[in-house]
Amino acid sequence: MKGADQCPRCASRRTADIDAPSPNGFYTRVVRGCYNCQTIWEPFDPADMLDMDIPTSSFLEPCNNCAFRPGSPEQADTEEWKKTITSLKAGGQFFCHKGVPIDVKNANGFAYPKDGKDPRKMRICRGYLNMWGAMMEKRMEAERT
């Protein structure tokens, strides 16, 4: 994974922020574009990372447009969201979209490295980690009683 100030595709630092509101609110309002390869992605502030020395570190808090926030577009299709949660509870992982090239043709809206098959290059979603932590706390509480 490239640094927060570099294009995630070509590593160029020749970028510009673009105010481009998403019609359905799926993508963040301000995206970053690369002058070299025309990749567009949602930028992030490295100060929001749990450990700035680890490029794939999770964030301290969920993103402003995290799939796990109440009312997110991802949760609009209740049945599909339930399938996602079931998959996660069965051992799946959920990766953050910040810093990942936007790909509107992809079912999930992003071009994850190697189509999401190489987790070493991806950041675990903070909203997912918070959900997982809450679920584990409930389990441990139930076992104590």
Image (tube, helix red, strand yellow):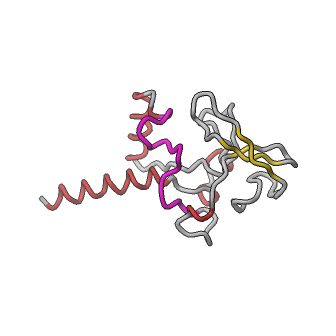
Q: Quadrant of the C terminus?
A: bottom left
Prevailing SS of the magenta stretch: loop
Q: Image quadrant of residue 52?
A: bottom right
Q: Is residue 6 left or right of residue 68?
A: right
Q: Nearer the viewer, residue 11 or 64?
A: 64
* Relative vertical location of residue 38 with respect to residue 59 in this rendering, above or below: above
- Identity of the residue furthest to the right in this view: 36
**Point 40% across, 28% down: residue:** 79
Q: Residue 109 location, x and y as percent?
A: 63, 36
Q: Quadrant of the N terminus?
A: bottom right
Q: Is residue 27 left or right of residue 140?
A: right
Q: How many marks?
A: 0
- Identity of the residue furthest to the front in this view: 19
**Point 53% across, 59% down: residue:** 59
Which residues are drawn in magenta? Answer: 57-74
Q: Nearer the viewer, residue 28 or 8?
A: 28
**Magenta residue check for 7:** no
Q: Nearer the viewer, residue 23 or 38?
A: 23
Q: Image quadrant of residue 141?
A: bottom left
**Point 83% across, 57% down: residue:** 12
Q: Residue 57 location, x and y as percent?
A: 56, 64
Q: Residue 70 location, x and y as percent?
A: 41, 39
**Point 87% across, 49% down: residue:** 36
- Identity of the residue furthest to the bottom in this view: 53
Q: Residue 28 location, x and y as percent?
A: 61, 41
